Image (tube, rainbow, N blue to C red):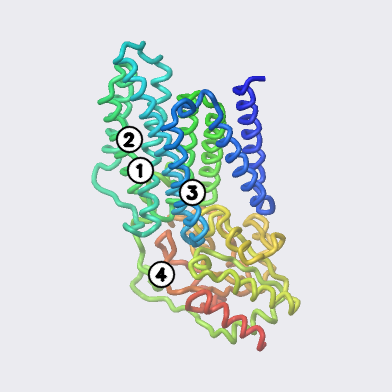
Amino acid sequence: MTLTIWINLIYLLAAIAFIVALKGLSSPKQARNGNLLAAGAAVIAVGATFFNPEAHFSHHTTNLILAIVAMVLGAVIAVPVARLVKMTAMPQLVAIFNGVGGGAAALISIVVFLSDAHLHDLGAPKPATYAIVEAMLGLLIGCVSFSGSAIAFIKLQELITGRPITYAGQQVINGLVGLGIVGLAVATVLTDSVPLMIGTAILSLVLGVIFVLPIGGADVPVLISLLNAFTGLAVAASGFTLNNNLLIIAGTLVGASGILLTRMMSKAMGRSLSNVLFSAFGSVVTAAGGADGTGETRQVKSGTPEDIGVLLAYARKVVIIPGYGLAVAQAQHTLRELADLLMEKGVEVFYAIHPVAGRMPGHMNVLLAEANVPYDELKEMDEANPEMSTADVALVVGANDTVNPAAKNTPGSPIYGMPIINADEAANVVFLKRSMRPGFAGIDNDLLFDEKTTLLFGDAKDTLSKLVAGVQEA
């Protein structure tokens, strides 16, 4: 067999490994192995590309050196960032890495387009129409993904407000920019014009920015998933442009999985994708602190770590409901210490995980895995809810909207219809909160004012440490 056939065989095996890896990522128990398998397949595929006679740098030493230098620089930047990133910053890390992928796909399209245009100026035939379409698709989608992911990163990093940024006629302007992009792209395909291609790229970058600005911080993770799908499609288009089957397959897998994840996240919030993208959800914040709509302030019941420690120690079943506040406080190890202590006292304990607890699907699973919490102690929302009515205590640590009864009981609420963990069905609710500020949805949580709810204010890590001491003394 020729070298080209061997290279394509390696690509095929890598593609199969990517599919198997995706299957592994669907389960917390196999996620690490799936990730390692995908990474190993990617390394082998990249290595094989250096020997591919059809690669653009295979016959040019300068290009080969530049490719190696770029890879080294990327590794020098990415490896420390990925290893040192805090769990709370994982969504923005995903956003910026995703943006880099989209930008790379756009740059490939630009380089190929300019190369073909240069050859055409020297007398070569005009590139086939389908080839120009492929390049323009990679350019358009890649630019939107790049600039959109950059704004998503900035929002999550709180460099600008996480609230929706809106202005008069916003949707009309977005529509006009979109139509302008389509018009320029079609004109570019027909004329093979470099200035029109550049205009398409600039407008696509603008669209990515104005598309993301009106999306609130709570919805940005859904947006990141959608932009991830866009990047996959851009990579697939680059695969057609470069005649590389592996890029086509890998890009399609990323695109398909991103779309599925986007749909799952929207469903978990009880909202349609169009509502997530175009409703400017979270732009209005209600008064925090217990306003009941009549100007009066409702009272909450707070407790001491010692009293709650006794309640937990003598409970029969305790359900722990973690949220983003747990990740912010980096309190997962202390939480596991508390759970282990309760189990030593004969208390039945498990963790109820909402699909969008934290900021990304699986965020809580990974966070608790860092503390070596056994997988069999984690129960997804649909599995946990039937047991909530038999729980003596629901211990809510840093969650808010995902346990808000308004999602079930208040038709006019912005979160009405969102599936939640039914913490209100437990005999007692213990709420660990830093303050009375509302969650991402910007609305008060009626569960805080329920007579069976006790609040314990403070940093989650410090509060949990006091609870551990309280349980030990009980």
Residue 422 lies in quadrant: bottom right
Residue farthest toward the right in the current orientation of the protein: 346
Of marks 2 and 4, the one in the foreground: 2
Amino acid type indicated by mark 1:
Ser
User: Residue under circle 1?
Assistant: 147
Q: Secondary structure at mark 4?
A: loop
Give x and y (percent) for residue 31.
64, 50
Compared to 389, does 9 lie above or below?
above
User: Residue under circle 2?
Assistant: 204
Give x and y (percent) for residue 409.
51, 60
Mark closer to the chain start, 2 or 3: 3
Q: Secondary structure at mark 3?
A: helix
Question: Label 4 vs label 1: CA separation?
Answer: 31 Å
The quadrant of the picture occupied by the C terminus is: bottom right
The residue shown at (31%, 19%) is 192
Find out whether the residues at labels 2 and 1 contact each other: C-beta distance under 8 Å: yes
Mark closer to the chain start, 4 or 1: 1
Question: Label 2 vs label 1: CA separation?
Answer: 8 Å
Q: Residues within 10 Å of mark 1 (few under 14, many from 20)?
A: many
Question: Label 2 vs label 4: CA separation?
Answer: 37 Å
User: Residue under circle 4?
Assistant: 437
User: Residue under circle 3?
Assistant: 75
Amino acid type indicated by mark 2:
Ser
